[in-house]
Amino acid sequence: MGAMAALGAEAVEALLGVLINPQSSSMQLGLASWGLAFVGARAPEALREAAGSEHAEIRAAAIAALGDQIQAQGDGAARDLLINALSDQHVDVRAEATTLLGKLHDSCWATPHLIPLLNDEAGQVRKNAALSLMKLQASNALPALREHLECEHEPDVTAVLQVSISQLEKI
């Protein structure tokens, strides 16, 4: 996968093929996602196209790989794709987009997008939103986190909310 990723844009199609192959192992899926992230900004158009794929697995991997384009390159189109992915019909895509927001180190931009995700129907997205807010040190999100803690019904999400609140209160 490393050699394929070093090829750049030429490898994107093959890496995407691994992601949608039902015979791919978990390790192969992980390596293909890593390879796609490694290609990153060297194949911006290919990643943007993949973010619009009909396959949720491809969309999720492409969104996860957009970080460098957004952060280092200031790619507005990639930012728009990330924002659109927050409302994707597939939970894995929303979860990846939520995680990426926390990695971008732009609390002012990300926090208003993350707070509504605390209401997402999927527990994984709610957990990722709380973790991203914590990672961004978004102490201004404390009221929203506390409010969601009171009505959260999934124990694993409750635990993450509690940790996020605790860490943000220390700031």
Image (spheres, helix red, strand yellow):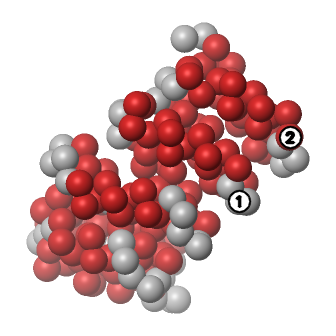
Which residue is farthest bottom? 22
Please state which of the two labelled residues, at mark 1 or mark 2, is closer to the viewer: 2
- Please tell me how crowded label 1 is: few (under 14), some (14-19), or many (20+) other residues with Cα within 10 Å: some
Rendering quarter of residue 108: top left
| Vertical placement of residue 165 versus 32, above or below | above
Contact between marks 1 and 2 (CB within 8 A): the answer is no
SS at mark 1 in the image: loop
Rendering quarter of residue 60: bottom left
Kind of residue at disc 2: Cys
Residue ID at (16%, 68%): 43
Q: What is the x, y in percent for residue 138?
A: 52, 25
SS at mark 2 in the image: helix
Which residue is farthest top? 170
Residue ID at (61%, 46%): 116
Q: What is the x, y in percent for residue 14?
A: 27, 84
Kind of residue at disc 1: Ala
Residue 134 appears anywhere in the view: yes
Compare marks 1 and 2 and give the one earlier in the sequence: 1
Q: Which residue carries the number 2 mark? A: 151
Q: Is residue 77 left or right of residue 111?
A: left
Disc number for residue 81: none
Disc number for residue 122: 1
| Vertical placement of residue 170 versus 38, above or below | above
Q: Is residue 64 left or right of residue 130?
A: left
Q: Is residue 108 left or right of residue 141?
A: left
Residue ID at (25%, 61%): 77
Q: Total of numbered circles in the picture?
A: 2
Q: Is residue 115 left or right of residue 79?
A: right
Q: What is the x, y in percent for residue 115?
A: 59, 40
Rendering quarter of residue 7: bottom left
